[in-house]
Image: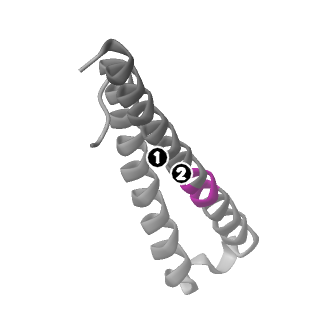
Amino acid sequence: MTDLTIFEKDTRRLVRLAEQLETLLNRRDRLEEDFARIEAELDRFHNRWMGCPGLVEQLLDIDKQIERIDAEIIAAFKDILAGRADG
């Protein structure tokens, strides 16, 4: 395998990683927007928030999703730094 072939292969892998990372960051942004919207809704109903358990559960679920995506983003950055990508 020539150096150019290796470089092209590595470049394609890094491009795929960058695309995956962009997708994760976009998902995370949308989840943060959902989180902020629900949090604002809870604030508006602060006197009755115990009567809205569905909102609380949804907020907690979104928070867990953000944590999972954060872990995926960190793993993707580690892969980029290590020069690896999913085949």
85 to 49, vertically: above or below: above
Please name the residue shown 36% across and 52% down the image.
68
Q: Position of residue 11 (x, y in %)?
A: 44, 27
**Quick check: is 61 in the magenta stretch?**
no
Q: Nearer the viewer, residue 10 or 29?
A: 10
**In contact (CB < 8 Å): disc 1 and disc 2:** yes
Q: Amino acid at mark 2?
A: Thr
Q: Quadrant of the N terminus?
A: top left
Magenta residue check for 28: yes
Please state which of residues 36 and 26 is positioned toward the viewer in this rendering. Answer: 26
Mark number, residue 20: 1
Left or right: where 13 falls relative to 54: left
Q: Which residues are magenta?
A: 27-32
Identify residue for label 2: 23
Mark 2 crowd level (few <14, some 14–19, many ≥20, 10 Å Cα):
few
Foreground residue among 37 and 14: 14
Instruction: Identify the residue at horizontal 41%, vertical 26% (top origin).
Output: 8
Q: Residue furthest right?
A: 44
Residue 8 placement, left or right of 1? right
The residue most toward the top is 3
- The reply, left or right, for residue 65 in relation to residue 3 is right
Q: CA distance from mark 1 to mark 2?
A: 5 Å
Query: Which residue lies at the image location 60% right of the left edge and 77% below the top edge?
Result: 49
Q: In this picture, is 11 found above or below 58?
A: above
Residue extending farthest bottom: 51
Q: Is the stretch drawn in magenta largely helix, strand or loop?
A: helix
